[in-house]
């Protein structure tokens, strides 16, 4: 399990390595590298999703590794409480950014509008109350980005929790 320790509380995420092995390995490596520490949820849309993992609280984008293969054709759905990879309009462009669905977003499932969809690779197993608090924050436009929380929602630390 991955724990995202935020200034709103902890979010526990269980990865589905059987259905999205490359995506889970990629996400886990970013956690191990400390990439997510100090990043923010920079795009928050109530009734859709909360997105993070790419920017610090000054809206400076963090450097990432090369993009990964899109594993959206894995049978997992962008249901409430699932975590998926964010990407550009290029299907195989996901790197570090992710989003947590705050409602059922089946239109993002494979094949989606572009023949690919967005890869679900896990689900929130604890802290959905934290996700629900985050989705309701006041947002603004900042540094050319819309839906940015007025008060930063910070991922202070991301870590792999001991199983047991």
Image (cartoon, rainbow, N blue to C red):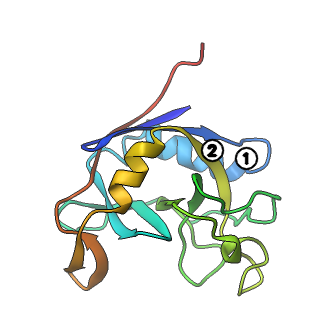
Indicate left or right for 53 with 15 as reference: left
Residue 120 figure quarter:
bottom right
x, y (%) of residue 85?
Answer: 57, 62
Which of the two residues, 73 or 136, is positioned nearer the viewer here?
Answer: 136
x, y (%) of residue 83?
Answer: 57, 54
Q: Are marks 2 and 1 in contact (CB under 8 Å)?
A: yes
Q: Helix, strand or loop at disc 1?
A: helix
Dot 2 crowding, Cα within 10 Å, few <14, some 14–19, many 20+: few
Dot 1 crowding, Cα within 10 Å, few <14, some 14–19, many 20+: some
Which of the two residues, 89 or 104, is positioned nearer the viewer here?
Answer: 104
Q: Is residue 117 above or below residue 127?
A: below
Which of the two residues, 130 or 95, is positioned nearer the viewer here?
Answer: 130
Q: Which residue is mark 1?
A: 21
Q: Residue at x 83, y 59 (%)?
A: 75
Q: Which residue is mark 2?
A: 25
Residue furthest out toward the top: 164
Indicate left or right for 118 with 154 as reference: right
Distance between mark 2 and mark 1 Cα atoms? 6 Å
Q: Residue at x 52, y 62 (%)?
A: 95
Quarter of the figure that contains the C terminus: top right
Q: Helix, strand or loop at disc 2?
A: helix
């Amino acid at each position: 399990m991955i724990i995202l320790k935020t200034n709103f509380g902890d979010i526990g995420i269980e990865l589905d390595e059987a259905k999205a092995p490359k995506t889970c390995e990629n996400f886990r490596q970013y956690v191990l590298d400390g990439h997510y520490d100090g990043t923010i949820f920079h795009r928050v849309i109530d009734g859709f999703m909360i997105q993070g993992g790419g920017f610090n609280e000054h809206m400076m984008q963090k450097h990432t590794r090369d993009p990964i293969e899109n594993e959206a054709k894995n049978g997992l759905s962008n249901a409430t409480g699932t975590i998926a990879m964010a990407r550009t309009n290029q299907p195989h462009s996901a790197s570090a950014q992710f989003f947590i669905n705050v409602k059922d977003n089946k239109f993002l499932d494979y094949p989606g509008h572009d023949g690919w969809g967005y890869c679900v690779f896990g689900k929130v197993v604890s802290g959905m109350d934290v996700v629900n608090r985050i989705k309701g924050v006041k947002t603004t436009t900042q540094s050319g980005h819309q839906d940015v929380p007025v008060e930063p929602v910070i991922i202070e630390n991301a870590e792999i929790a001991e199983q047991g």
